[in-house]
Image (cartoon, rainbow, N blue to C red):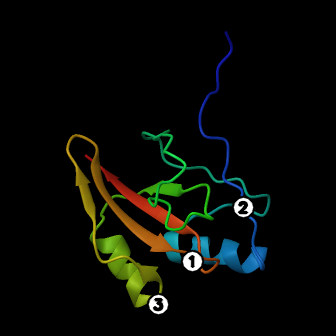
Amino acid sequence: MERVLGDGGHFLPAADPAALTAWYRDRLGLDADDDGLWRQETGPTVFAAFGSGTDHFGSRSQDTLLGFRVRDLDAVPDQLRAEGADVARETQDMAGVGRFGRVTDPEGNRVELWQPA
């Protein structure tokens, strides 16, 4: 059986695609090229399904949650707050998995930040 090789992309609708792309570049360092190609560091990726009634995504109207690996879950939220981003104060620890924090992008999408264990 053929199988997928990895995460192949994240695609978001936006009222202002250029501004949203710039936000991810300037605030999170997501350095995609003009075609959207992003060469990310090697590391784990989580694939998980949640029940349809979950509030984990921020609102019931958000049906996908972007998750990004970070090296330092204390530094990244502080950096985002200094730039005026809407960052949740609380973090979550999951034994054996790592720490999680959340930020909301300018289009209202909740984004999860993950520092692997």
Cα distance, mark 2 to mark 3? 25 Å
| Residue contact at pointers 1 and 2, CB within 8 angstroms | no
| Residue type, mark 2 in image | Asp
Q: Which residue is mark 2?
A: 33
Residue 75 versus residue 88: which sits nearer the camera? 88
Local SS, label 2: loop
Determine the secondary structure under disc 3.
Answer: loop
Q: Residue 46 placed where, x, y %?
A: 45, 41
Q: Residues within 10 Å of mark 3 (few under 14, many from 20)?
A: few
Q: Residue at x 55, y 49 (%)?
A: 52
Q: Is 108 situated left or right of 67 in this image?
A: right
Mark positioned earlier in the residue sequence (1 or 3): 1
Q: Which residue matches tag 3?
A: 84
Mark 2, Cα crowd under 10 Å, few <14 / some 14-19 / many 20+, is few
> In this rendering, which labeled residue sits more in front, label 2 or label 3?
3
Which amino acid type is marked by label 3?
A: Gly
